[in-house]
Image (cartoon, grey):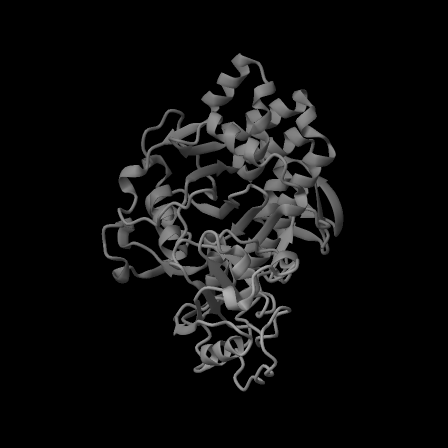
């Protein structure tokens, strides 16, 4: 829920100086640096990852540690990924019933191969933000730049400041625990009703956390649409009430000041609602407990996409990017190509290498990797983009990525779901490309995402 607050802080510059400092003083900040693992992932230059935690507890203002948050429940955990060029925002929901590796007793000094598998939402209750950060970073490989805990009471004020938020429910809701009763159809909810709506679980749908996450994502889409529709940014009277409620609901790390929020918000102010995507970590039933879930192989694909700063929306990931314009580098002038087999199927890289050699690529080597990433990724060193485009033209749907880790070579990683090599438009020689006898396995799973501009009833 804090995503919206963060985005709209960009207009704080329009607020009078005294109001600025009032908003600054609303936020509680705590220092968790001393409790974070010493072997954290490396922070990528450009992308930004923010951990958002929906909780029922808020620490006192000017707090200096996280002790007051230990024991609090984390109903909702989101990882918000801002792309390096700030053209896209991806919001990933992590099911609280996920069984994941977690530091024992939240002690991150214990070697990771000794971490037990525990229920995900226990991390925040046992050790506050630091334990949750250590858990998420270890299990995803992402570096989390900031965190923010959003108190549900403040969340109600944010909704009321918007004048209510429309929701669409296909079936009637009557949930005593959530204190919510709605007929089927579209409703405009006030803050109290909205809080009940995003927390409904047991009396709507299949009663799972996954159904609740779907409603939360639809609700967040509605919030973004409503703020856009009402021109909130151009209404200082309504905007201040929203920001006041939003900042009162926040507990953050020491570095996430209002000024930092403003800088972040400024960087994404031109992101359209169609470029805000909501994704749920792909899961399946946990074998040892049918009431719990575990992450699937597709979750690895999701986290890798964020590590590579790639879009997760289907309209982007399904679009071939190999050769949108004429190729300018002949196969004969392409430097060494290394085809890495990431499918687990023997012989695929060698087959693809021969299909390139017959087209005039002079140096083609092969290798293997245990990493499973759907599709084909073509990585190239600085200055070799055009040569990489010639290589990528042979692999339908290939993605291009500049990398400093390939030396002077162009590296092609072939994964599940990859298609057979095709002729490049500027190929050399006339010998036919051999027919493939080895095929890649099916893609592990697609990543389902909804964008903020979708119909809230969908």
Q: Residue furthest left?
A: 110
x 55%, y 48%: residue: 91
Residue 232 point in image, percent of width and height: 68, 29
Looking at the image, residue 133 lies above or below residue 140: above
Residue 388 vs 360, above or below: the answer is: above
Residue that sits furthest to the right in the current view: 185
Q: Residue at x 46, y 75 (%)?
A: 343
Q: Is 72 positioned to the left or the right of 401 in the image?
A: left
Question: Residue 322 is drawn in which quadrant?
Answer: bottom right
Residue 56 location (% of width, % of height) = 47, 40
Rendered location of residue 419, percent (x, y): 58, 74
In the rendered image, residue 431, in percent from the top left (x then y), is placed at 59, 83
Residue at screen point 60% across, 72% down: 427
Nearer-the-camera pick, 412 or 336: 336
x 52%, y 18%: residue: 20
Q: Is 233 located above or below residue 350 in the figure?
A: above
Horizontal arrangement in the rendering, residue 215 relative to residue 334 (left or right): right
Q: Is residue 374 visible?
A: no
The one of 257 and 421 positioned closer to us in this rendering:
421
The quarter of the rendered structure image containing the C terminus is: bottom right
Can residue 322 be seen in the rendering of this structure? Answer: yes
Q: Quadrant of the N terminus?
A: top right
Front residue of 135 and 165:
135
Q: Count the marks.
A: 0
């Amino acid at each position: 829920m804090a995503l919206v607050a963060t985005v709209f802080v960009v207009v704080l510059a329009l607020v009078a100086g005294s109001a600025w400092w009032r908003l600054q003083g609303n936020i509680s900040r705590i220092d968790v640096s001393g409790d974070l693992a010493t072997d954290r992932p490396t922070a990528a230059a450009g992308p930004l990852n923010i951990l958002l935690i929906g909780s029922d507890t808020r620490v006192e203002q000017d707090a200096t540690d996280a002790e007051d948050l230990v024991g609090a429940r984390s109903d909702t955990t989101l990882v918000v990924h801002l792309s390096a060029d700030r053209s896209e925002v991806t919001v990933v929901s992590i099911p609280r019933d996920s069984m994941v590796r977690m530091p024992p007793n939240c002690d991150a000094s214990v070697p990771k191969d000794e971490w037990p598998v525990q229920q995900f939402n226990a991390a925040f209750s046992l050790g506050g933000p630091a334990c949750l950060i250590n858990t998420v970073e270890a299990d995803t490989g992402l570096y989390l730049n900031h965190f923010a805990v959003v108190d549900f009471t403040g969340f109600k004020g944010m909704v009321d400041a918007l004048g209510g938020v429309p929701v669409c429910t296909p079936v009637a809701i009557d949930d005593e625990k959530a204190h919510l009763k709605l007929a089927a159809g579209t409703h405009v909810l006030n803050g109290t009703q909205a809080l009940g709506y995003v927390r409904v679980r047991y009396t709507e749908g299949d009663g799972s956390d996954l159904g609740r996450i779907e409603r939360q994502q639809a609700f967040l889409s509605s919030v973004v649409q409503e703020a856009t529709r009402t021109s909130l940014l151009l209404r200082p009277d309504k905007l201040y009430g929203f920001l006041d409620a939003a900042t009162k609901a926040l507990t953050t790390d020491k570095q996430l000041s209002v000024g930092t929020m403003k800088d972040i918000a400024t960087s994404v102010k031109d992101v359209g609602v169609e470029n805000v995507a909501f994704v749920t970590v792909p899961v399946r039933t946990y074998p040892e407990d049918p009431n719990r879930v575990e992450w699937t192989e597709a979750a690895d694909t999701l986290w890798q996409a964020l590590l590579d700063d790639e879009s997760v929306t289907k309209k982007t990931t399904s679009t071939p990017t190999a050769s949108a314009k004429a190729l300018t580098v002949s196969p004969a002038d392409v430097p060494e190509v290394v085809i890495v087999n990431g499918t687990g199927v023997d012989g695929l890289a060698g087959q693809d290498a021969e299909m390139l050699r017959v087209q005039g690529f002079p140096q083609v080597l092969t290798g293997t990797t245990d990493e499973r990433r759907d599709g084909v990724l073509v990585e190239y060193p600085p200055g070799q983009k055009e040569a990489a485009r010639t290589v990528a033209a042979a692999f339908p749907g290939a993605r291009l990525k500049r990398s400093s880790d390939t030396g002077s070579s162009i590296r092609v990683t072939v994964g599940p779901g990859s298609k057979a090599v095709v002729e490049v438009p500027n190929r050399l020689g006339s010998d036919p490309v051999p027919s493939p006898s080895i095929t890649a396995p099916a893609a592990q799973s697609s990543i389902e995402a909804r964008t903020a501009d979708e119909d809230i009833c969908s």
